[in-house]
Image (tube, grey):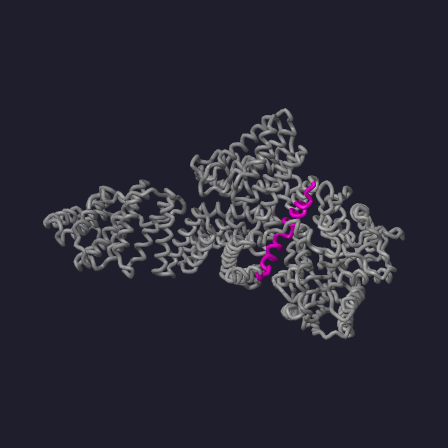
């Protein structure tokens, strides 16, 4: 077989991780007398390779090779070569011994370092070896040796043809080896190394599939082989980079985890580094910040085994930025800056290495200057960021993938700089040129690109806007409009980038009073908002993604709705607000939709969709469960990924059926206007300039809009701050027997009174006048009409139900004189529960915790629960009443009781966590030192079909997180998510002596007329607070204002 037989033709490639094969660097032309350490290396490499096929060597040959290994100077290699050549020429072609001598000739030539001659000898041997058991072993030796020699020559010279031939020879070697053949695993390692090298070089799709196929074959030989798992992890990640299929990078992580657990300590550093790399790649697929944290953790573990590679250091830099972005924890910023400066201090770095440090370092410096992170960027820090990114561009090689990235970052930095200084025309022109260059480079399509045009266009548009504002004669107006429009309309992997472009386009159109253009831009923005998070993430991570976005999503949605109202499209305004509020919550509720209608058409599809929905619901908070091992956590995460993908596929199948086109799609305005709410629903859309009240139920089948021009987001924020300060001054942090003593004081009453009066004059009075509402006659004996408040923005934290003028006795100056108030997180939620069929009443569960360890005692809770139970007993209704108190009131017991009872009354301490709202909890029994929390997550993930009514007699049960004001993340919302149709909660701490009075009156009203009717709960609370005002005076706001009603 001549040398041209190895000219295997292949169009391939990739360039990723360097994988070292056998080191076969040769010393050409060595003389017999010069066989020293170089010869030693050749023999040491050759003997193990020949020993892979022991049956191919005669006892004499084996003894000879071992002797040669012991004594390099025992004979002249040239004499051996002459001997082998003479022996092989003594036999005719096809003789059984000729091939064997040629194979021995190749071996000796390889030892000497005559690479080309050795390859030729092995090739000639293949032509003459007789195919029998001995012959097959010699054939494998020849193919193995040829593959190793050619791979070594490729490593040295970089000729792609050598790599093609090497892979062909290694494939042939495997083909000639039985499935259970000895040393097959070593042959696979050589082939996998070569395939990775060719993918690195050429990035051919065929090599992606072949690499993965061969890696999977190898693991079937020995699943516990760490090196095979390592190669499988590399192959899966390589395949993921090409196909962008999430399951591939998930499998890559698991394979590399197995590789780490099976590896020897000396291999562990590299494997941990590659495991970190896999997590890094997955972060950019699903944007789960925990993946970046895992990347940092594994790189830190790799450091324990020695000095990590330069590549690992740059990976660590990137992940420190990601976690800093997600958490704003300054320690990650400081660590990244220190590491970057240390790396750059090494003068031996090449340009490409400096580039790979400068870009992530510039990125993290940019984040520290970003307006959403700091109110006043440090000009020196900003200048340092700009210089870093300019240096990165200077060092960037022309063949570098993702070349738009440093230009994109530099454009953002220049945009910030132009806003805080007095830039010249030339400075603007320079910034514009950088932005344009970034957009140009973003058109380059490679698999490693993380930046596209929709990323680069918005910052360029920002610079053009500043330029036009500073120099109206600059003539960049048309380009600015085009840039923002393209950013919104071009396809992109990032919904966030399109959203950013759409919002900036809308802002521009608004400034030009182009209302239709503004509407078109917001139409795209509202669509993008639906895709900012993914069901495959845990609920915790979905909330984190929403709350860490630089774009004020809630304000954009509210402004979009205002534009729709301005154009007379109030139905669209309602739809947009509903779509962009409680995004995460709505996804969870979609998992609970009845499958009855679908089951009548496609029962198998309905059954599986219901099963997948249940599994997703039960695992929504898996990452908050304590004590879960790392491997189990990763498995749960991947299970959720697969379930979410299957759920999306099943929903798509359902929508393809006749009559199910709109299955689980956001509801339209027609649905809301057709609902019989039994009162009016007022959606308060507040934004930076004004406020609109969108009202349902006041005019059958129609929406009406009342402009509230005196209210805006700034005023709402001021009122919310004033209210918080008033409560802090009064010590209203927890329910306390002494809480009432802290309230009385003229200044505190005035603070609350001022907030309530502003709400009256700016919202309620103009709205009630617009609706022509009259004060309800208390002497008529009838109940007042119902009204549901659905506030947005900072209005969500204000007591609209208590708005009024409390420095006058004039009738018709307080909300409670007109309506009985309730709240709803969204209009859609209220519509759904009103249309929901009521389950049969199944009893009352009371929970009392007067002495929670670590909390102030609240002894009146015992009186409260006793009075509630007494009212229930005296009602004469047959019902199951279960009371859990003190040590019996554990989280597990309460959760179990919630399943068995329709109503629950919780009289205990509660904790609202402002930084991690999903960690908010009721404080119960179970730990003698500090009690045990029943967390919001534990409640919300329980889909309790029996749930009906909950009375949360604790503190802050309806107080949410300011950063998630549109997501309704508080304990009352958790009860609604658990299936409760009606909830009475508190906006802040209540007096321990007031709660029993309110509770007793509420239950008396609900249990009247011979049945348990939670539908009366709103009116029951309305009458109870009225009685409380008569008892303590309406200006004793703390006794009645905190109690609010949610739901139907």
Image location of residue 980, percent across then percent down: 67, 63
Region of the chain picked out in magenta, as a range:
568-596
- Left/right placement of residue 289 relative to residue 510 reads left
Q: Residue furthest right?
A: 809
Does residue 609 appear in the picture of this structure? Answer: no
Depth check, front residue: 383 or 455:
455
Q: Would you place residue 861 above or below residue 11 in this image?
A: below
- Left/right placement of residue 350 relative to residue 198 reads right
| Residue 181: in magenta span | no
Depth check, front residue: 121 or 474:
474
Total count of labels: 0
Does residue 585 appear in the picture of this structure? Answer: yes
Image location of residue 69, percent across then percent down: 23, 54
- What residue is shown at x 70% (from left), y 49% (from top)? 792
Image location of residue 624, percent across then percent down: 58, 60
Depth check, front residue: 715 or 350:
715
Quadrant of the frame with the C terminus: bottom right
- Left/right placement of residue 231 relative to residue 945 reads left
- Judged by its main secondary structure, the magenta piece is helix
| Residue 578: in magenta span | yes
Image location of residue 405, percent across then percent down: 51, 39
Depth check, front residue: 491 or 868:
491
């Amino acid at each position: 077989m001549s040398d041209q037989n190895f000219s295997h033709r292949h169009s391939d490639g990739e360039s990723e991780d360097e994988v070292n094969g056998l080191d076969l660097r040769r010393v050409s032309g060595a003389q017999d007398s010069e066989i020293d350490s170089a010869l030693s290396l050749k023999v040491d490499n050759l003997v193990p390779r020949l020993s892979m096929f022991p049956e191919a060597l005669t006892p004499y040959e084996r003894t000879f090779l071992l002797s040669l290994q012991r004594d390099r100077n025992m004979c002249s290699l040239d004499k051996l070569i002459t001997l082998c050549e003479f022996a092989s020429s003594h036999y005719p072609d096809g003789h059984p011994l000729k091939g064997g001598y040629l194979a021995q000739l190749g071996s000796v030539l390889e030892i000497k370092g005559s690479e080309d001659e050795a390859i030729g000898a092995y090739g000639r041997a293949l032509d003459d070896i007789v195919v029998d058991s001995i012959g097959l072993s010699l054939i494998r030796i020849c193919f193995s040796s040829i593959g190793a020699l050619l791979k070594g020559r490729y490593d040295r010279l970089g000729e792609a043809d050598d790599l093609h031939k090497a892979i062909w020879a290694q494939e042939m070697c495997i083909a000639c080896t039985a499935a259970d053949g000895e040393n097959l695993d070593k042959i696979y390692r050589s082939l996998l190394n070569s395939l990775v090298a060719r993918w690195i070089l050429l990035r051919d799709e065929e090599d992606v599939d072949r690499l993965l196929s061969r890696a999977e074959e190898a693991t079937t030989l020995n699943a516990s082989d760490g090196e095979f798992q390592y190669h499988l992890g590399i192959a899966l990640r390589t395949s993921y980079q090409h196909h962008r299929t999430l399951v591939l990078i998930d499998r890559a992580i698991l394979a590399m985890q197995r590789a780490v657990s099976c590896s020897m300590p000396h291999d562990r550093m590299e494997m941990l580094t590659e495991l970190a790399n896999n997590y890094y790649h997955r972060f950019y697929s699903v944007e789960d910040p925990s993946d970046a944290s895992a990347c940092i953790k594994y790189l830190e573990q790799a450091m324990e085994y020695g000095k990590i590679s330069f590549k690992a250091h740059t990976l660590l830099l990137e992940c420190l930025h990601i976690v800093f972005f997600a958490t704003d924890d300054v320690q990650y910023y400081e660590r990244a800056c220190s590491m970057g400066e240390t790396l750059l201090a090494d003068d031996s770095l090449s340009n490409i290495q400096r580039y790979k440090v400068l870009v992530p370092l510039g990125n993290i410096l940019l984040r520290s200057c970003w307006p959403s992170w700091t109110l006043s960027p440090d000009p020196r820090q900003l200048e340092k960021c700009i210089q870093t990114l300019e240096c990165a561009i200077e060092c960037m090689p022309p063949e570098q993938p993702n070349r738009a990235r440093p230009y994109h970052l530099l454009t953002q930095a220049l945009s910030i700089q132009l806003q805080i200084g007095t830039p010249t025309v030339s400075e603007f022109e320079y910034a514009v040129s950088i932005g344009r260059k970034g957009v140009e480079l973003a058109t380059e399509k490679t698999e490693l690109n993380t930046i596209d045009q929709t990323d680069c266009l918005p910052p360029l548009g920002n610079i053009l806007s500043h330029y036009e504002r500073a120099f109206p004669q600059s003539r960049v107006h048309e380009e600015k409009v085009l840039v923002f429009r393209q950013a919104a309309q071009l396809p992109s992997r990032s919904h966030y980038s399109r959203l950013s472009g759409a919002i900036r386009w809308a802002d521009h159109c608004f400034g030009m009073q182009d209302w239709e253009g503004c509407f078109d831009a917001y139409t795209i923005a509202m669509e993008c908002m639906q895709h900012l998070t993914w069901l495959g993430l845990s609920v915790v991570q979905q909330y984190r993604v929403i709350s860490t976005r630089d774009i004020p999503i809630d304000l954009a949605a509210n402004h979009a709705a205002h534009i729709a109202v301005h154009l007379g499209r109030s139905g669209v305004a309602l739809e947009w607000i509903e779509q962009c509020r409680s995004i995460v919550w709505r996804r969870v509720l979609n998992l609970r939709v009845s499958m009855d209608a679908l089951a009548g058409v496609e029962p198998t599809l309905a059954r599986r969709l219901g099963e997948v929905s249940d599994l997703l619901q039960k695992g929504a908070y898996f990452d908050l469960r304590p004590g879960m091992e790392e491997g189990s956590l990763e498995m749960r995460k991947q299970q959720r990924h697969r379930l979410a993908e299957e759920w999306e596929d099943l929903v798509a199948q359902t929508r393809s059926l006749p009559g199910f086109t709109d299955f689980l799609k956001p509801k339209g305005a027609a649905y809301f206007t057709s609902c019989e709410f039994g009162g009016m629903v007022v959606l308060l859309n507040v934004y930076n300039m004004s406020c609109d009240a969108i009202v349902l139920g006041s005019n059958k089948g129609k929406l009406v809009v009342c402009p509230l021009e005196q209210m805006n987001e700034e005023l709402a924020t001021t009122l919310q701050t004033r209210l918080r300060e008033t409560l802090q001054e009064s010590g209203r942090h927890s329910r306390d027997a002494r809480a009432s003593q802290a309230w009385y004081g003229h200044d505190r009453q005035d603070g609350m009174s001022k907030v309530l009066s502003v709400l009256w004059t700016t919202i309620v009075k103009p709205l009630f006048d617009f609706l022509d509402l009259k004060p309800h006659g208390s002497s008529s004996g009838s109940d007042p009409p119902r009204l549901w408040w659905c506030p947005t923005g900072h209005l969500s934290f204000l007591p609209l139900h208590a708005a009024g003028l409390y420095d006058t006795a004039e009738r018709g100056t307080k909300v409670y004189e007109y309506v009985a108030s309730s709240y709803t997180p969204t209009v859609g939620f209220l519509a759904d529960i009103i249309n929901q069929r009521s389950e049969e009443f199944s009893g009352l569960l009371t929970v009392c915790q007067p002495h929670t360890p670590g909390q102030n005692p609240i002894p009146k809770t015992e009186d409260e629960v006793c009075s509630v139970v007494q009212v229930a007993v005296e009602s004469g209704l047959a019902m199951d009443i279960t009371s859990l108190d003190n040590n019996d009131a554990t989280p597990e017991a309460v959760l179990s009781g919630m399943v068995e009872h329709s109503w629950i009354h919780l009289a205990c301490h509660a904790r609202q966590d402002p930084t991690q709202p999903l960690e908010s909890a009721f404080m119960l029994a179970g730990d003698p030192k500090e009690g045990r929390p029943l967390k919001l997550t534990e409640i919300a993930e329980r889909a309790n079909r029996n749930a009906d009514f909950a009375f949360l007699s604790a503190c802050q049960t309806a107080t949410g997180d300011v950063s998630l004001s549109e997501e309704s993340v508080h304990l009352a919302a958790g009860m609604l998510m658990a299936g409760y149709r009606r909830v009475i909660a508190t906006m802040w701490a209540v007096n321990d002596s007031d709660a029993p009075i309110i509770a007793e009156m509420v239950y008396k009203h609900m249990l009247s007329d011979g049945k348990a009717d939670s539908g009366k709960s709103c009116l029951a609370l309305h009458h109870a607070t009225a009685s409380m005002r008569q008892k303590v005076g309406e200006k004793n706001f703390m006794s009645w204002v905190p109690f609010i009603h949610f739901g139907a």
